[in-house]
Each structure stands twice: as C-alpha cells, then as structure tokens.
Amino acid sequence: MKTNDLISLLAEDAPVGMRLGRMLALALVAGGVVSALVLLSTVGVRPNLATAIETARVLFKIGFTLVLAIVACRLVFLVGQPGRSLKARGFQLAVPGLLLAIAVVSELLVLPSQAWTASLIGRNAGFCLFFIPVLSLAPLAGFLIVLRNGAPDNPGLAGASAGLAAGAIAALLYAFHCPDDSPLFLSVWYSIAVLLVTAAGYFVGRRWLRW
Amino acid sequence: MNASTREQEWAEWMRSAMKGDTQAYHRLLSSVTPHLRAMARRRCDQFGAPASEAEDVVQEVLLAVHLKRATWDPDRPIGPWLSAIVRNKLIDSLRRRGRHVNVPIEDVIATLEAEEQGDGLGRMDAVNMLERLKDPQRDIVRSISLEGAGVRETADRLKMSEGAVRVALHRALKSLAALYRSETREDE
C-alpha cells in the first residue's frame, strides 16, 4: 500500500468521537452505579448505618477507602496517555497508606492488647475477601475496556492501576455494609481484597492492554 | 522552520482534525510522515532491511497515531505525546519483524525529514490487503484510498448514508492495523 493512500484514508476518519478522559469518567460512574446496585440488591447496607456512621472508626473506614479510590482513579485517568510521567500521582498513593498507618497505630494505643486479635480477625473476613472483588468487577471491566482505547506506555501498570481503583471503589461501597470497623481489620482484609483485584488487573492488562 | 513552531502547527492541526477538519488532518499526517520515515529508515538501515520494510513500519506508526489520537490532551504539547506513540510503536513493530532496538529512539519533532521520498510503497500489497477486509469496508477503502473519493462521494456511490460510511471506515482502519500486526507476528 502507498503511504499517501493510507494518509488519505486516515484523513477522512478525522473526527474523534469521545476523548479518553470522558470515556473513563463514564466507565467510573457506570461501574460505581452497577456495583452500588449489586450491594443494595443483595446484602444491603448495615441496619444500624445511621448511628454507626457517627463513630470515628466507621468514619475513618469510609474516609480512607474514599481517599484511596480518588487517588487511584487519578492514576487511571493518566495511565492511558502515552508519554506522561506517573511519578507525581503514583507518590500520592502514599497519602492513604499513611492515613492507614496512623489509624492502625492509634487503634493499637486505644485498644487493650487482649482485644487486638478479635478486632483484627473481625466477624466477616471471608465474606469481605469474597465480596470486595465481586463489587470491583463492574468498574474494573469498565476501566479495562476503556483503557483498551488508550495507549499506555506500560500495559501491566495500566491494568494494575485499573484494578487498584476498581478495588478501592468496591471497598468504599462495601464499607457501608461491613460490620467490622477496626482499622486493624481494614489494614489486613480490605488490603488483601484490594490487592487481589490489583493483581488481577495487572495480569489482564499486561496482555490485553497492549496496542 | 524550527522545532517549536512546527510543534505548535502540528498541535493546531490536530485540534482542528479532532473536530472533524479532514484537510488539517491530511496536512498533519503529511507533515509528520517524512520525520517518521527518516526514523524508520535509520533503524532499518542499521539492520540491513530494505526501504519497503521501513515504509511498512511508517504505515503501522501512522495507524497507531490515528487510532490513539483520543489519548492526546489538546491542552498539552503534542511533541511528547507523538514521540511516545512513535517510540512504543516503532519498537513494537521492529521487534515483531525480529529486529531488536537497543538504542533510544529519538524525538519525532527533532528528527530531520527523510530527504528522498521514494515511492512510499510498503510491502503489504494493497490489493491483497483489500481482499481481506469485509464488505462494505473493502469498497469504502478502495473508493477513498485508491480512487481518491471523499466520504460523501463514497456514500453516494455505494448508496449508503455518510454516517454508515464513517463507521465502516473507522472499523476498516482498525482491521488494517490488526492486519499489519498479524502479518508480522512471530513471537507471540
């Protein structure tokens, strides 16, 4: 084929329907809504939510997952654009990390050491490990499908970012159901669940987001 | 023309193109291509590969620039974006041809244009490639690329709506990009 013929062909397809950022925003909203509906139509929010939400631990649980979701989503919005440095936004992940560390230390100081194990193991660890990945499916699928239209410099990293953001959104939603409020529980079981989703995103992205 | 005015011009053309200005887009792609060609030829020369192979690489990179242009943020300079697309695709394309690049790829804008244009003919045979597209993509590609018609003229000729021609054209370009990849796939 002649290159000039190809250029004529490409030129006729000039207009861009939707830019990547807009598509990602749609995927974020759609994925969040679907997962929220899944939560509400299955296990629902905790019955005592109105009173529980006033306690420091529950506020922290929701605040922490929200911060993690925001920071991770900001990374997803950058990772599909080639030639952009991810360092600044990557370092922002330290913010939720630091918040969690402070909360864990505070919890250890506040609780008598006999209560540590019970708080850490909680009541619903198994379900948490199962349900956060379930709630992450819709946002993860949305992000990955959109990022396939992107041009990530590092497909594995792009997939992992999508997984982290989807896992964080799922954790944020699950926090409204979950009866385990201790930062100790959060730091172990929520982290494992979100990391599982991140790893899944990495493995899918490494192959599927190549372009 | 120095690099920064060229970059501004390219960015301006790309902004217009994304809004649907086919002439601006044609100017942009025609202006970028000699730079891509110089980069691809230099690499292929290193490997002792023929110029027609370099032209295939140029065409693959052009398709990637096209299919990924929605990832460019119009508020940002176009140079780093373009260089990143070209770097990724050039390395990928050469690697699939069994040629491993182990020196950094230069900047697109800073690269001088290839001096002689050659016939700009790639090895991927146009007729053969067309045969592998589905209807009506094949007729649309033939009409626009080989016969030089626009979208409207093509729509009239094929008794289709302009919108349908645009959708089919976009799909055809994605198929062409996949064809380039499958033609050279060897290590996956």
Image (tube, grey):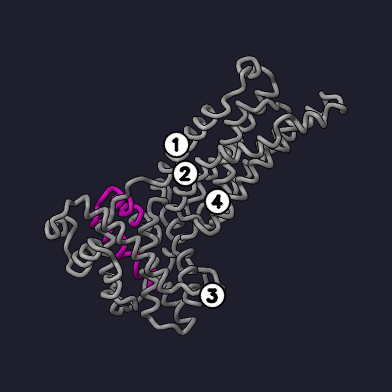
Q: Quadrant of the N terminus of chain A?
A: bottom left
> At which x and y percent is residue B144?
20, 64
Q: Mark 4 — residue?
A: A159
The local secondary structure at tag 1 comes to: helix
In the image, what residue type sits under mark 4? Gly
Amino acid type at mark 1: Ala
Whether residue B22 appears in magenta in the rendering, the answer is: yes
Q: Look at the magenta stretch and give its main secondary structure.
A: helix
The residue shown at (22%, 55%) is: B165
Contact, mark 1 vs mark 2 (Cβ under 8 Å): yes
Task: Find disc 1 in the rendering and name its residue.
Answer: A30
Chain letter of disc 2 in the image: A
State how far apart marks 4 and 1 are (Cα).
18 Å
**Amino acid type, label 2:** Gly
According to the image, label 2 marks what residue? A142
Instruction: Tell me the residue at 63%/19% (across/down).
Output: A53
Q: Is residue B61 above or below residue B12?
A: below
Q: Nearer the viewer, mark 4 or mark 1?
A: 1
Residues at marks 2 and 4 on the same chain: yes
> How many circles with numbers are drawn on the protein?
4
Give SS at disc 2.
Answer: helix
The residue closer to the viewer here, A46 or B11, is A46
Q: Residue at x 53, y 27 (%)?
A: A40
For label 3, the residue is B100
Question: Label 3 is placed on what type of residue?
Answer: His
What stretch of residues is rendered in magenta? B10-38
| Helix, strand or loop status at disc 3 | loop
How far apart, in angstroms, are the residues tagged by discs 3 and 2?
34 Å
Instruction: Decide if residue A103 is in sight here.
Output: no
Tell me: residue B71, above or below residue B83: above
Q: Which numbered disc flags the more N-terminal residue, 4 or 1?
A: 1
**Residue at mark 2 to residue at mark 4: CA–CA distance:** 12 Å
